[in-house]
Amino acid sequence: MSVEEAKITASQEADPYSLGAGFNGTEIVPILEAQIPLVDMGFLHSDVCYDVVSVWKGSFFRLNEHMDRFERSYEGLGFSMPYTKEQMRQILIDMVARAGLRDAYVYMCATRGLPDLDDPRDMEKYHQCFYAFAIPFVWIVDPEDQKIGTDVIVSSVPRIPKESVDPTIKNHHWGDLTRADREARGKGAKTALLLDFDGNLAEGPGFNVFVIKDGKLLTPDDNVLLGITRLTVFDLAEEMNIEAKACKVPVETLRAADEIFMCTTAGGIMPVKSLDGKPVSGGKPGPITMKLREAFWKAHDDTKYSTPVNYD
Amino acid sequence: MSVEEAKITASQEADPYSLGAGFNGTEIVPILEAQIPLVDMGFLHSDVCYDVVSVWKGSFFRLNEHMDRFERSYEGLGFSMPYTKEQMRQILIDMVARAGLRDAYVYMCATRGLPDLDDPRDMEKYHQCFYAFAIPFVWIVDPEDQKIGTDVIVSSVPRIPKESVDPTIKNHHWGDLTRADREARGKGAKTALLLDFDGNLAEGPGFNVFVIKDGKLLTPDDNVLLGITRLTVFDLAEEMNIEAKACKVPVETLRAADEIFMCTTAGGIMPVKSLDGKPVSGGKPGPITMKLREAFWKAHDDTKYSTPVNYD
């Protein structure tokens, strides 16, 4: 047994769900036992859509919005799911309860699945699959580091255009995002912002981007995922009387920004402190960003957004 | 037990490898038992490269070229594989022998794999994985239908540009290809040819494309996989004194072609008989295409290309 295997075994003997729980298509199992068929088209052709929702202090945040978007995604791919939306929603809740997680990163996906053995060539007859997992909350940027701000670059890798792959159907086509992330780390930055082929801001690896100029919020309206955290920023901006607009954001506007922040379920609102090595908002998180960030985490206590988990 | 499960059980009781064999990262198992971890980044971020090689009449065809390309792919992604190239090559041979397949479609892939439990955020520390499977030979187009020719369309979906995802690293980013395939089937055609964003021919779902004009072969030099069957076409053309060139192929050149064929490991050289409903080469396979097709299958008997499987 390798050191790695010994560690896993020791950890799992104490509590098989200590690292999280997974749903393998039919049942809830410890995360490291959750497997999918090698020949699932969700893997072989990345013919899959997914969603990620968070659990904070024992409650899901905006679960209904995530389930609705997930439904639009799998319907957009022409999938017939083996479970109803309500059943899948319940599987997520049960999974978090089983793992006993109070703060969790909860992933779900729908795959094209497996061929019909009587007619294996007809893609329309494939048997779709639902998989999911829940692990302790994932921070793209550590909360302590968020108070300092993050160094990012503008990647030389352009985002896959929407004409080729629809970014509003949340998908696993991360090839460009992974290249951009590795480019950023190679340059000593934490992550990257990707542009479209016309030089307008698109999105980053797993997050949307907002620019603040003269007190107004701007975020790309095209070639991006319509993020739920992005939606929450619009909701909060309205409550706080801050003007916010989805529109084209040329790279020049990005470079001239007063403040920049990234936003995603896995980390919330994350201030940028430098772009390509040049300070943004004086090399520290901007004031409007930090006000929105505070309001974002406060919103997690708002019952209109929350679905409590029953851990009994 | 469902009818589907009953069929699988009956088939597997007779011979557990009747549907093929898979390699799950550590051992060879019946294909339907081959699984991968749900949290492998090869699935979650499609951070994976693959290759497909054929076995024909008990011998691999150009196995060394496929292994060399596979190596270039995983090295291009910065992977450290858990097996040597020679070990992976032997796993493929053992897998085909175990399944007892004389004619097989053999898939192998390398994934970014699983996080290091001590430092789960550092992508460079992930533990890479190798998976594979062998199933009875797959024909994208039935051999009998190949003698008639295939109806194809020019898809409205553009190929993912190489600046975003490198097509020479054979990858699972099939979103555009799947959309194009579904578009073709919706229009009553069999499959689709995709263009790049400049209106030049790129490739199709799982195959390269050749155009024949005035006795010369043309195939795209950019935004395509450097296919091994494509390479074999160049080799055969040279032997047959047919001029062949990799260059830009504008859609106008495609539409004015005397003959068109698709080529891939899973089907060989496949003549096109119509493009967007208009006949190509008189609505039947062209004469140069059929000569190349004959030479292609004859080449499978050439010992310089073949690696015999030991089935004992």
Image: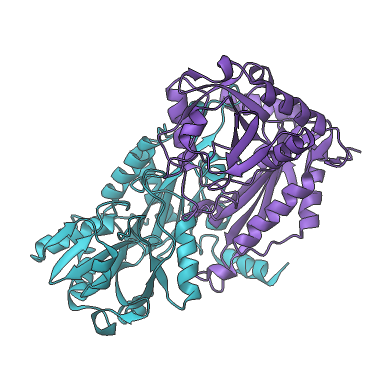
Chain colours: A purple, B cyan
Residue B76 visible somewhere in the drawing: yes
Of all residues shown, which one is farthest toward the left? B241
Which percent across, then down, holds residue A130?
68, 54
Which percent across, then down, holds residue A239?
79, 36
Frontmost residue, B17 versus B151? B151
Residue at image x 29%, y 54%?
Answer: B227
Q: Is residue A122 above or below residue A56?
A: below
Q: Is residue A183 above or below residue B235?
A: above
Q: Is residue B306 left or right of residue A288?
A: left
Dividing the picture into quarters, in which one does residue A306 lie? top right
| Image quarter (top left, top right, bottom left or bottom right) of the C terminus of chain B | bottom left
Frontmost residue, B93 versus B74? B74
Frontmost residue, B62 versus B238? B238
Q: How many marks?
A: 0
Frontmost residue, B180 versus A305? A305
Q: Is residue A30 left or right of residue A174?
A: right
Residue at image x 40%, y 34%?
Answer: A156
Of all residues shown, which one is farthest toward the right? A312
Q: Is residue A222 left or right of residue B307?
A: right
Which percent across, then down, holds residue B1?
73, 67
Dividing the picture into quarters, in which one does residue B287 lie? bottom left
Q: Is residue A194 left or right of residue A84?
A: left
Residue B111 visible somewhere in the drawing: no
Which percent across, then down, holds residue A7?
64, 24
